[in-house]
Image (cartoon, rainbow, N blue to C red):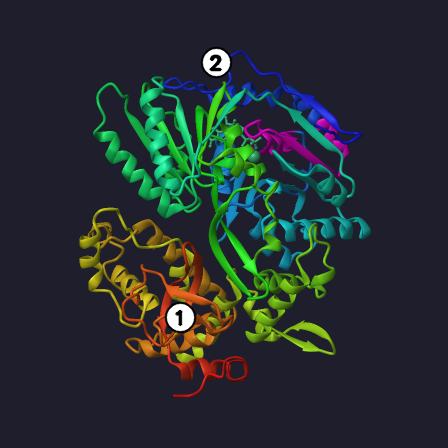
Amino acid sequence: KKFKPGSVFFRLEKNKPGMLLPRKGNVTTPIDVQRKQLPIYQARTRIVNELRQLHNAIVIGETGSGKTTQIPQYLFEAGIGRQGLIAITQPRRVAAISLAARVSEEKRTQLGKLVGYTVRFEDVTSPETKLKFMTDGMLLREAIGDPMLLRYTVVVLDEAHERTVHTDVLFGVVKSAQRRRRELNKIPLRVIVMSATMDVDLFSEYFNKSPVLYLEGRQHPIQIYYTKQPQSDYVQAALVSVFQIHQEAPQSHDILVFMTGQEEIEALARTCRDIAKHLPDSCGPMVVIPLYASLPPAQQLRVFQPAPKGCRKVILATNIAETSVTISGIKYVIDTGMVKAKRFNPDSGLEVLAVQRVSKAQAWQRAGRAGREDAGFCYRLYTEQEFDNLIPTTVPEIQRCNLAGVMLQLMALGIPDVMNFDFMSKPSPEAVRSAVEHLELLGAVERKDGQVLLTALGKRMASFPLEPRYAKTILLSPDFSCSEEILSIVSLLSVDTVLFNPLGRRDEILAARKKFTSSEGDHMTLLNIYRAFKKVGGNKEWCRENFVNSRNMGLVKDVQAQLREICLKLNLKLESCGADTGSVRRCLAHGMFINAAELQPDGSYLALDTHQAVAIHPSSVLFQAKPAYVVFNELLHTSRCYMRDLCLVDADWLLDAAPEYFGRKLHLTRS
Ligand code: ADP
Ligand code: MG
């Protein structure tokens, strides 16, 4: 490993074996003792002394070494940045919440007091809050009102290697805030960039030649296994591996399986539990615990609890368990080699969510989770040759997603020339052009004398923490007298699915859903379910009977309340169209016309914007009906490119929404 000159090393000594972590079983070490047992604790004075002198620093240390939970506390305890808040940003909402909970527990304070968190649609902070965990998207939103981030004295950009769009934009915003505060003689802003793994040269160069602090921990050896043959079904392969380990490795060490998303994880969890019930007595008991971003916080915390003695914990997680949360007790890692991520084709303007291969760096991070406390094993469900062919590091999201939302935010931040924004990695000119076109179609920007300017509509759109087309749909809704309905629909689409689809109960589910199903599409069906849910006052029993996820439904209400607040600030007229669902669909057609598709004579669909072949996802209520025109929410690429969440529309509405666009581009004619 090559280190930068001028780097500072902290060699972290491991404590006596068995002392380091809460033991399995019922014995738990008091939390303050746990804190002191972390290897980083011995280096704290030196770390604080270094950080005190620096305005930019990069901290690198293995996952679990204590960067995220300890360093903010050390800064606070040492009085660094006392004049303001310390922000710690996380790419994921689940990490922001669970880390804030942990740190406030360590501080023996109530969550939301000294230590709090802010994520989209949820703010658990108070005037007392000094340590604020937040998603990078939220800090970015705050920057719209306060570009110099004057409330903060320290910004810790955590998990910097993740390179989400928001992190990348935030890098530039924080850097510019720091510079402007220096120029204006304001209280300086300290910027600390942290990660377990990153391209040190790139980051150090970008952040004013930051010095690098290395926390040198020791990894235990990990044996890596590959499959002999490529696997066609990684879920099945994961299932087989879990039970092979469970039956062949007698001690109840825990297993961590890396999967791609909620539905897949929940389905596999159920299968595992079913199989576990029917195992011979010679196999010990097993608890199966899912971990993904949209999991309710209480359930998220379950992954951290040790399993009862003699019981094996099997955690099925998304890439969230790669670096952002640390789970103790893992000896076996099963890596499917897959991840769900955004992919964007600037030529077609299409952003799709696709299950794809991880990078080598991700594969190594995953394997590393097995060796935190002792020697471990990593089972890669792909061949060694497949591993060799993986890309070295993940491409930053900014180079593979639709930039319309980011551009809108940047412009609302007063950064007009997005192409010349100080990005760590620049998006391609085609992607920027495609985003500008998208915003122009929505009326959020206009060109004047070769410049791209935010319109009044665009400014209003930027008030919503939503994708531009959703914001636009809400802003249009008063014209169709259906703002209440649109707010409900957008809220329903902003949480993970409110439908609960347990495996093996298909017929029951279909029967229960039937009474809500609308021939006008999924939006209307969701709206029906939501209306019925509200009618029974959010009754849990009703949710169970109707296969509705009651927690996510509760979230929908919160989201709606917040969106409504924004609408009120914008003086938007809020009214309901009652039974006139045609107005709702007309409004959706006007807001979502970029995502429209047309039925072809052969029964397939063509996305009107890009002329790409797409299909209706089998989960849609319109799967059989095949209407002539639909608008859809998103595209999911698996074996084919599927449209998800569809709404039946008229061709005329699309033409009305964007006459020139459809006339010019698609020769759509009135019926
Ligand atoms: P890093 O940021 O370096 O990856 P963290 O600060 O997140 O490390 O975690 C440090 C240690 O704190 C972990 O090794 C783990 O033992 C403990 N820890 C963190 N979060 C929790 C939690 N929610 N519950 C129990 N222990 C936790
Ligand atoms: Mg961390």
Q: Residue furthest top?
A: 16
Whether residue 635 appears in magenta in the rendering, the answer is: no
**What residue is shown with label 1?**
605
Eye-nearest disc, 1 or 2: 1
Task: Determine which quarter of the picture holds residue 254.
Answer: top left
Residues 506 and 563: in front is 506
57 versus 329 height, above or below: below
| Residue span colored magenta | 48-77
**What residue is shown with label 2?**
18
> Is 639 displayed left or right of 214 in the figure?
left
Residue kind at label 2, given as amino acid type: Gly
Task: Determine which quarter of the picture holds residue 442.
Answer: bottom right
Residue drawn at x 48%, y 20% is: 21
319 versus 66 height, above or below: below
Residue drawn at x 32%, y 38% is: 269
For the residue labelled by badge 2, is the local secondary structure a helix, a strand or a loop?
A: loop
